[in-house]
Amino acid sequence: MKKKILYFKNLKFQKKSLEILNKNFNIVSSDKLKKNYFNNIISILLPMDNFYSKEFFNQFKNLRSVVTPTTGDIHLDTNFLKKKKIKIFNLANQKNNLNRITSTSELTIGHILNLTRKIVLIYKEFIKNKKFEKHNYLLSNKMLTIGILGLGRIGKHVAYRAEALGFNIIYYDPFVDIKKFKKVKNFKQFLKKTNILTIHMHYKKKYLNMLDMKLLKLLKKPSYIVNTSRGEFINEADLIKCLKSNIIEGTGLDVLKDEFKKKFRKNPKNNILFNFFLKKKNYNIFITPKQGGSNKSAWEITETLIINQLIKYEKNKI
């Protein structure tokens, strides 16, 4: 008899991925979960759409693994899972395989070009006024320095692409030393030399609201921020103040604070930064709804990687 696994429909796995799962397991869909199934579920495939707590996991008495196709675990009660020795499978240990995925870095470059060239704002202005006007206040790429916070897999992808477009590249990362790009060892000096700050760090709780007014003010003018990593890095109230006072020229975000929680998903307007974005149409601020990994080829790779980890783990278990 095939082992039962719980699959959350919000994952929206592709047909091929579901066929592989169905071949190896008895899939219980989240919308068809019944109480008499709880004790037979040995693994849960979870999306990053809520915080899954001790109370949730405690319902499954024979649970031995949790699978989530993300590089982070901010949406999981990791302390409880570790205490219960429930295995966590995600993409954090798949760096070499993930090198083939460039979708987040491509989106980052898109945000950078949109902010610095004001593409969408100028387009809206043109549609409104129907006038061909020059905007000679815009700077060329070679006059701007991109500061990459975290030169890991995605950070490197961004660096190579941005360099090809003519931007100056510097980075801050105590754990990496890549001679091709200029490393700045002092974080405050790194910010002072950076026009466009783009964040590509792995999130930990100690980094909550790390980028506050004090640090944002250090950025070189004109200043821009792009975040396709985790919303928790930025003090959102301070970022709004910086935008209002022109300390920050513009920001492009693919993530917001607490966006993985159900409360946020139910009403994003409760997030102060998203609310500001909706009301202030003339500001150079653009938010994309977590589109970093959203393309067909990326999904094929990540889904296969995560499913194979689960199959391998369960192969020799009863």
Image: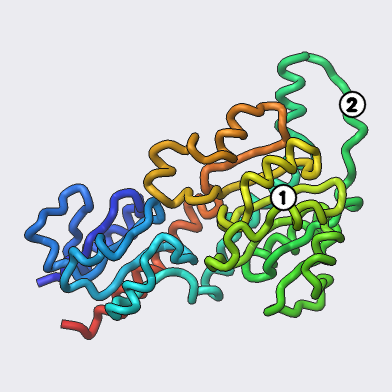
| Residue 126, quarter of the rendered image | top right
Q: Is residue 88 above or below residue 240?
A: below
- Viewer-nearest of discs 1 and 2: 1
* Residue found at x 37% / y 56%: 51
Q: Can residue 20 be spotted in the picture?
A: no
Image quarter hosting the C terminus? bottom left
Farthest front residue in view: 214
Q: Which residue is mark 2?
A: 134
Residue at x 60% of width, y 65% of height: 207
- Left or right: 282, with 48 as reference point: right
SS for dot 1? strand
Query: Could you tell me which residue is drawn at 26 percent across and 58 percent down?
Result: 7
Q: Quadrant of the N terminus?
A: bottom left
Q: Is residue 114 above or below residue 301?
A: above
Quarter holding residue 159: bottom right
Q: Residues within 10 Å of mark 2 (few under 14, many from 20)?
A: few
Q: Residue at image x 71%, y 32%?
A: 283
Tag 1: amino acid: Ile
Q: Position of residue 81 (x, y in %)?
A: 32, 73
Whole-percent x and y of residue 37? 11, 61
How many marks the image carries: the answer is: 2
Viewer-closest of 301 and 83: 83
Image height of 86 relative to 135, above or below: below
Helix, strand or loop at label 2? It is: loop
Apparent side of residue 260 relative to residue 96 in the rendered image (left or right)? left
Q: CA distance from mark 1 to mark 2?
A: 25 Å
Q: Decide: few, some or many residues near mark 1? Use Cα within 10 Å; few <14, some 14-19, many ≥20.
A: many
167 or 60, nearer to the observer? 60
Residue that mark 1 sits on:
225
